[in-house]
Amino acid sequence: MALTGLPPDTDADIARVSQALAMITPRWNARILLALDGQPLRYKEIARKVSWLLNGQLHLKLRQLCDAGLVQRTEHTSRHVTYGHTDRAAALLPVLPLIVTWAEKNLEKPERPLPAIEQIEDGLTLLTRRHAAALLWVLKARGESSGRSLARMVMPDSDWTNVYPPLRQLVADGLVDTDGIGQPYRLSAAGASLGPVLGALSAWAAGQPLRQAAHHPVWGQPEGMSAERKWVSSPLRLPAPTATTTPPTPRQSPAPAVHHGGLFSHSVPARPTAALPAGGPRR
């Protein structure tokens, strides 16, 4: 069943990205995935890394991540069970630093420095707003569009006025701009700069190498994505990369170098100049 009134390939692309976001955005999912980066862990070892979760909550989250195909449960004996990343989860990890880089440059600046994991969670929350992916896709592909035109493409089976609540939310989030009531909508600078993130999520969701993000028909940058500064949260504790836990970084869309364990750290680099004069999209 079509998700939008867009061409089938585009509709399928948006559906895959929306499904991928639905897997990783729920509260604590990204933290658990990062806690599992490395060798498979027993339940008690994971619980120590995410000690704020009650046992019942952690059991439920691990089961959901197993059902989503991101975590593999291995029963060695009846008393020895481990949890580890699937290949799909390992391939997803390089996307997370792209979200950190985008959030650092575009989200409003809080009073206290945020650990990178919170930057990831804030960015993911904005992208999982209702109809957000489809609206961002259309505005990126077609430029300025009226609310009625967006409704026809994004929610063809619904009353066209239903497009305004999600559009107002995207404007409030700082991802979409408009000059006022009755005026067309367009991506803000922050919304347009989501290309590396959404292109990488699209490639991952389609089972393609992340380097394909540079060639995405909507979000790609054929000449290579703009070079980003290297982002390292804990430079003194960078582990040696391994073939099983650190997928190769795509050449066309390099992710900042990140120690995934350090994503929990409050030691973040100095924040760059805000991309938006008003302080960036809201968190």
Image (cartoon, rainbow, N blue to C red):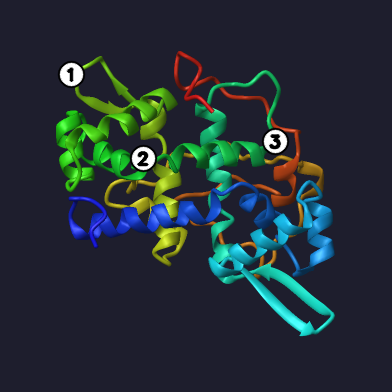
Disc on the earlier residue, 1 or 3 = 3
Mark carried by residue 182: 1
Query: Label 3 belongs to which residue?
Result: 115
* Residue found at the far bottom of this picture: 77
Query: Label 2 belongs to which residue?
Result: 132
Q: Position of residue 109 (x, y in %)?
A: 59, 21
Disc on the earlier residue, 3 or 2 = 3
Query: What element does badge 2 sit on?
Result: helix
Q: Position of residue 114 (x, y in %)?
A: 68, 30
Q: Is residue 226 left or right of residue 156?
A: right
Of residues 154 and 95, the one drawn nearer to the viewer in this rendering = 154
Name the residue at 73% across, 43% down.
Answer: 264
Name the residue at 56% across, 49% down.
Answer: 26
Crowding around mark 3 (Cα neighbors within 10 Å: few <14, some 14 to 19, many 20+) is some
Query: What element does badge 3 sit on?
Result: loop
Q: Marks 1/2: CA distance?
A: 20 Å
What's under tag 2, amino acid-wise? Answer: Ala
Q: Position of residue 101 (x, y in %)?
A: 55, 37
Comparing marks 3 and 2, which lies closer to the viewer?
2
Q: Marks 3/2: CA distance?
A: 25 Å
Q: Position of residue 46 (x, y in %)?
A: 78, 60
Q: Given contact means CB atoms under 8 Å apart, are the residues at marks 3 and 2 in contact?
A: no
What's under tag 3, amino acid-wise? Answer: Pro
